[in-house]
Image (tube, rainbow, N blue to C red):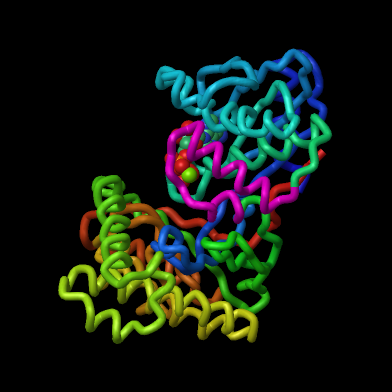
């Protein structure tokens, strides 16, 4: 794991004219199953990717944060102490720095201070692999270590989430930061989004002769903003109509479906309740070492997201369909919907055939060729040097 450290150390020296005090790395993530369950106080099951964000950093004692990124044109210098970044109305070219500066401002209350940071990343941004949380978590670890502040990782995940909520102004849940900080190699992380409690679940596809492919469907998230908000509102409306705090609390699905008059709300409840069951069933299957059977959970999740929650998109449906026909154990859309990626669980022996079948299905329809990433469950955030 010391390979990503080398370019970022050299980059730091070129940018700041001195060696960094250390290098920290935080991974992106893929959520295996549990989609649109997080804001219903339910369960998710992400694992960490080998790709992520590296931060080379040196402590400063002047209370200033200076951030540069190899993926951003503008260097930003700002006080580590200050109001929420979002309230300062930064221009667009500084917007990326709201993530690390926001983390510094939240952690300031816990005793950290200034630093010079150089960021480098091999994660695509805005692709649903959680580059934002990786950036926050690598920065948070660096600031804590540089200033000798000890915060346990579940608490640090909440602080990084707070930075994204309050400083960047993005109302994200706790999954991405928890995955980046708490995941371990060869495991997925079962996270209860209500309590924040999590547990490690063995997930090592390679050991079972399987591969987990991430398929970039190259479809833009044209409708995500509005539709995502609408789904959240529908879930809240259904929970209120059923007299529960969140849809996670629906224990009698048949009774709930009988109570609700609106067919749209019935479909939304059907998805959320059964998706939580699928996460719990998946955990059982993975703990039993039944990885191939887990593929069926992915297929069931996809059908529910397509037909009940109605957030799938044609390129996702085509990818899942082509993959299963070519011998994959299962697949599903991931993320909010209407664009982004699909994951596919396939025997390694069929992986080439699966990739070819998806590519051919796209070519037949005249769509942009899909992209593929072989996702290996990797360690969570750590200090590299
Ligand atoms: P995702 O987390 O799915 O990648 P987000 O929209 O939540 O998508 O976060 C992407 C944003 O995070 C980018 O627009 C940018 O502001 C910031 N970001 C992520 N990685 C980097 C990086 N290496 N350098 C600078 N900014 C980054
Ligand atoms: Mg993000």
Res. 264 visible in picture: yes
Q: Which residues are magenta?
A: 152-179
Q: Is residue 384 magenta?
A: no
Q: Residue at x 71, y 17 (%)?
A: 63
Q: Residue at x 44, y 23 (%)?
A: 87
Q: Is residue 214 left or right of residue 336?
A: right
Q: Residue at x 81, y 22 (%)?
A: 19
Asked whether 5 or 119 is in front, the reply is 119
Res. 329 visible in picture: no
- Residue 168 drawn above or below residue 265: above
The percent coordinates of residue 53 (x first, y second) are: 62, 40
The percent coordinates of residue 159 (x first, y second) are: 62, 42
In the picture, residue 300 is in which quadrant?
Answer: bottom left
Q: Residue at x 74, y 13 (%)?
A: 62
The percent coordinates of residue 328 (x first, y second) are: 44, 77
Asked whether 360 or 166 is in front, the reply is 166
Could you tell me which quadrant the C terminus lies in?
Answer: top right
């Amino acid at each position: 794991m010391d390979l990503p450290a080398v370019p970022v150390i050299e980059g730091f020296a070129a940018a700041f004219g001195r060696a960094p005090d250390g290098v920290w790395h935080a991974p992106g993530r893929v959520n295996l199953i549990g989609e649109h369950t997080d804001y219903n106080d339910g369960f998710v099951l992400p694992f960490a990717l080998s790709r992520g964000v590296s931060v080379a950093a040196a402590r400063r004692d002047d209370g200033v944060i200076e951030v540069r990124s190899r993926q951003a044109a503008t260097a930003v210098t700002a006080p580590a102490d200050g109001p929420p970044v979002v309230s300062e109305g930064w221009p667009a070219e500084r917007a990326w720095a709201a993530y690390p500066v926001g983390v510094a401002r939240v952690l300031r209350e816990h005793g950290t201070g200034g630093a010079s940071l150089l960021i480098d990343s091999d994660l695509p941004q805005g692709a649903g692999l959680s580059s934002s949380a990786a950036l926050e978590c690598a920065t948070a670890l660096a600031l804590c270590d540089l200033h000798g502040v000890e915060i346990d990782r579940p608490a640090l995940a909440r602080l990084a989430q707070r930075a994204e909520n309050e400083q960047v102004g993005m109302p994200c849940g706790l999954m991405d930061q928890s995955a980046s900080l708490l995941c371990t190699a060869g495991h997925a992380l079962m996270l209860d989004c209500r309590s924040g409690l999590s547990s490690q679940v063995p997930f090592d596809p390679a050991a079972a002769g399987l591969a987990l492919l991430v398929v970039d469907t190259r479809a833009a998230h044209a409708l995500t903003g509005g539709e995502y908000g609408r789904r959240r509102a529908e879930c809240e409306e259904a929970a209120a109509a059923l007299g529960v705090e969140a849809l996670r609390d629906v224990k009698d699905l048949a009774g709930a479906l009988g109570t609700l008059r609106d067919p749209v709300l019935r479909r939304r409840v059907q998805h959320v309740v059964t998706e939580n069951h699928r996460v719990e069933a998946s955990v059982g299957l993975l703990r039993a070492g039944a990885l191939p059977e887990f593929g069926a959970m992915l297929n069931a999740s996809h059908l529910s997201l397509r037909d009940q929650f109605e957030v799938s998109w044609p390129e996702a449906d085509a990818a899942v369909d082509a993959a299963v026909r070519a011998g994959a154990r299962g697949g599903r859309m991931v993320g909010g919907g209407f664009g982004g990626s699909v994951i596919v669980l396939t025997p390694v022996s069929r992986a080439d055939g699966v990739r070819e079948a998806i590519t051919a299905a796209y070519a037949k329809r005249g769509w942009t060729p899909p992209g593929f990433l072989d996702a290996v469950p990797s360690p969570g955030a750590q200090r590299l040097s």
